[in-house]
Amino acid sequence: MRVIFLRKRYVFSGIIIFIILLLSGIFLFNFWGTRETTPTLVEPIYQGKTDEPHVSLTINVDWGEDIIPKMLEVLEAKNVQATFFITGRFAEKFPEIVRQIDAQGQEIGNHGYSHPHPDRLTVQQNMEEIKKTEEILRKLINKEIFLFAPPYGERGPNCLKAAENLGYKTILWTADTIDWQEPPPSVDTLVKRVTEKKLTNGTIILMHPKPHTLEALPIIIDVIRAKGYEFKKVSEII
């Protein structure tokens, strides 16, 4: 009886070991299989190509209907082309401004519809924000839109995946004017932030249609040009 008992114990131990090894193998297979097959998200673009002395001005628009026409006057007078990222709700409310931006030869990109926090949305919700704005802009300017600037500069996986699914390039920035801060920074602060240490080939500059930004805009253009840089649309430097 003792021999039988020992054999049963060994058999039982062997079964336990086999199950542990089997489960470990399944876990490792799933782990490495997932790592190898999970698609890598396309990273956002922070800077353009660095092979030439060129930079881009980007203006994110969800307000500023009284400032944008004046910014356009400055850009036209200085012969500068910029990229305006516009929300769908702004475009619905001020279609004539969107058409004016396009008519002047400025570039237009997608800034979502309602300026939400993309990182709080699902992939599907982010896609709906982008698609809704795309349809509005296409009706207004009859052009394909393929550049997307996420509100608040948020770049979580749901946001990036939504843009990628829709064929968009996600654009962020190299230098931030911080013109969105309250209380507003001085004009001198705005100018220095984007014309000194962060200025290099391919720099993408972020700004918004604010009164102090309008005041700083011609100075920023003149200083950057004096340093030997050319202004181009975002699509021309990425």
Image (spheres, grey):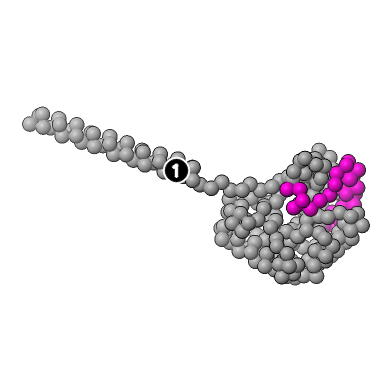
For the question of whether residue 179 can be seen, the reply is: no
Residue at 88 percent across and 42 percent down: it is 228
Examine the structure image and report whether residue 218 is included in the region drawn in magenta.
yes
In the rendered image, the residue lying farthest to the left is 1
Amino acid residing under circle 1: Gly
Find disc 1 in the rendering and name its residue.
33
Residue at 91 percent across and 47 percent down: it is 222
Task: Say which quarter of the image contains residue 75.
Answer: bottom right
* 152 to the left or right of 57: left
Q: Nearer the viewer, residue 2 or 76?
A: 76
Q: Position of residue 2 (x, y in %)?
A: 10, 29
Task: Say which quarter of the image contains residue 69.
Answer: bottom right
| On-image quarter of the N terminus | top left
Q: Position of residue 86 (x, y in %)?
A: 74, 61
Tell me where the magenta segment starts and ends, as one range.
Answer: 210-238
For the question of whether residue 136 can be seen, the reply is: yes
Residue at 73 percent across and 67 percent down: it is 142
